[in-house]
Image (cartoon, rainbow, N blue to C red):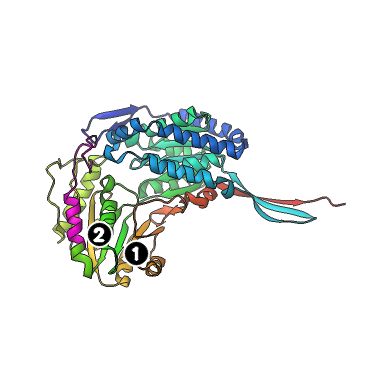
Amino acid sequence: MLTCISPIDGSVFAERPAFSLEEATEATARARAAQPAWAARPLQERIDLVRAGVAAVGAMNDEVVPELARMMGRPVRYGGEFSGFDERATHMAGIAAEALADIQVGEDATFKRYIKRVPHGVVFVVAPWNYPYMTAINTVAPALIAGNTVVLKHATQTLLVGERLVRAFHSAGVPADVFQNVFLQHETTSALIAASAFDFVNFTGSVGGGKAMEQAAAGTFAGLGLELGGKDPGYVMDDADLDAAVDTLIDGAMFNSGQSCCGIERIYVHHSLFDAFVHKAVAVVKGYTLGNPLDPDTTLGPMAHPRFAEEVRAQTAEAVAAGATAHIETFAEDDGEAYLSPQILTNVTHDMRVMREESFGPVVGIMPVRSDDEAIALMNDSDFGLTASLWTRDPERAARVGDRVDTGTVFLNRADYLDPGLCWTGCKNTGRGGGLSVIGYHNLTRPKSYHLKKVTA
């Protein structure tokens, strides 16, 4: 039995029986059997059905928002994920015809040559709990549009999301076997991958989870898309718009209780702005309201599980013991469990875990720097590389700095946003592959070349 424990009060919110290996194998077999007919449908028909499925999810939003609060703790005041969910799916639908078009190589009286993009077959999407709708649609929408069938597995913490997604898409006309939700234990997941049940696996989650996916897929030659850990930096240069930098970077560090793949986890500020930046940042964080996410006045909800909060408390305590300064007093609502006070740390160094390991919680360390070279060296002193947020009034300077940062995305004067027109990708222990944009379609299809010799005699 898979059990979702609500972070609001520790009660059981939902339970579902896990599929047996036999049941899971039957589900993937149905997906494989349904795929040729789905791929044979006209592209525009698949696009229209996916758009209709997305709209059906939007119609559920009044139910989805409090349900997400109960499952993973995000405050209802933020309205859920449908805006980003819809933006990503709509963009991928809009570029599909061009992204999936044949690549014409040449034609003359003797030969016609072109490259088609053809679907892999069955795509397995393993989605995380922190943004369960948006992370899932990144792959679900383009995979279905490209002609793949999709098997979706969500994290136990957001147990009901997959059910809602498939129910919405089925109501819009997507066939039941084309898009399926499954409830799987880790062992069953690994067994299915090892048995070549899937042609492509997209996983968003921990580094350990990504390694398990790679190990399970070894020798199957299945494609893998992995978005794993992050320790995303912000760098505030001497000519930055200070107020905008504080507001955006601190929001990027604290929103969703810091539980964001591309959340800001460390900030480097030019020494001339350092004191002012910290002063303003502390004032912002002291203004947060920690509490029940179902209360519309709450701006910071509980972390999704007490064990996640425990790791953040441990990293923070270790840093303070090693000389870091904590600027935020413990909030009265901090219960030592899932409800965790936000924290800003200074006097931090890269010898501390809080500046090197993924925290995935509402804590951020801030360090002064004296030059771009120093900031670049610190930003690159990490095992991860998802995004980097640069703050300056000089775009050319930002581009020069960005070229030297080991990361998947470079932001200028913004942070913590996924633009569906750009490839969402990373480097180092953040993973491999890329989602969304035209590159997302390339990763969810394979090239098939046609070299056609004409009969001329």
Q: Is residue 73 visible?
A: no
Q: Which residue is mark 1?
A: 380
Number of residue marks: 2
Above or below 144: residue 419: below
Residue 362: give x, y in percent of width and height.
23, 49
Residue 420: give x, y in percent of width and height.
45, 49
> Dot 2, crowdedness within 10 Å: few (<14), some or many (≥20)?
few
Residue 447 is left or right of residue 311, and the answer is right
Marks 2/1: CA–CA distance: 26 Å
Residue 74 is left or right of residue 444, and the answer is left
- Give the label, 2 or 1, closer to the camera: 2
Q: Main secondary structure of the magenta part?
A: loop
Residue 106: give x, y in percent of width and height.
71, 57
Q: Is residue 27 visible?
A: yes
Which amino acid type is shown beneath numbered disc 2? Asp
Above or below 407: residue 81: above
Residue sitting at x 50%, y 40%: 123
Residue 419: give x, y in percent of width and height.
42, 51
Which amino acid type is shown beneath numbered disc 1? Asn
Q: Quadrant of the N terminus?
A: top left
Q: In terms of depth relative to the viewer, which is nearer, 205 or 389? A: 389
SS for callout 2? helix
- Magenta span has 256? no
> Dot 1, crowdedness within 10 Å: few (<14), some or many (≥20)?
some
Number of the label disc, if any, that sits on residue 456: none
Residue sitting at x 34%, y 60%: 413
Of label 2 and label 1, which has the lower sequence position? 2
Residue 454 is left or right of residue 70, and the answer is right
Q: In terms of depth relative to the viewer, which is nearer, 269 or 385? A: 269
The span picked out in magenta is 277-302
Q: Which residue is mark 2?
A: 243
